[in-house]
Image: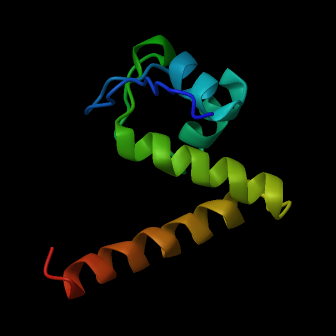
Amino acid sequence: MAQDRVLTGIVVDEETLTVDELAHACAVERRWVRARVEAGLLGTTVTGQVQEWRFASAELARARRLVALERDFDANEELAALVADLIEEVERLRAQLRGG
């Protein structure tokens, strides 16, 4: 018997997520986000006080990638950021090859 399933979500646009929302979406604590921002590994465009920081959807994807790399491979934050940078660069190059 097939069940009807409804998928709901929130459309994430530019500069919409707060620190707490980003932390919740990545299942990490607020201090994890703050540490990566202060180290320059995440949210490179955020300025001002922590409570004023806003993150775009691309930063959400990057944060989730960092969390996964740190957790799955027991990578330190700098190594995870380097790997994330390389993955993002490969994605950009593939998009260029496709003409996008």
Q: Could you say which is closer to the camera, residue 52 or residue 56?
A: 56
Q: Could you say which is closer to the camera, residue 42 or residue 8?
A: 8
Quarter of the rendering occupied by the C terminus: bottom left
Q: Relative to 67, does residue 95 appear above or below in the rendering?
A: below
In the rendered image, the residue lying farthest to the bottom is 97
In the rendered image, the residue lying farthest to the front is 1
Quadrant housing residue 56: top left
Is residue 15 found left or right of 91 in the rendered image?
Answer: left
> What residue is rendered at 60% in x and 61% in y?
81
In the rendered image, the residue lying farthest to the right is 74
> What residue is rendered at 37% in x and 28% in y?
47
- Residue 92 horizontal/vertical position (percent): 31, 74
- Residue 61 horizontal/vertical position (percent): 48, 47
Residue 41 visible from this viewpoint: yes
Q: Relative to 53, does residue 72 appear above or below in the rendering?
A: below
The mark tally for this picture is 0
Residue 44 visible from this viewpoint: no
Q: Relative to 48, does residue 63 appear above or below in the rendering?
A: below
- Residue 33 horizontal/vertical position (percent): 61, 33
Is residue 99 found left or right of 46 in the rendered image?
Answer: left
Quadrant housing residue 8: top left
In the rendered image, the residue lying farthest to the top is 51
> What residue is rendered at 38% in x and 73% in y?
91
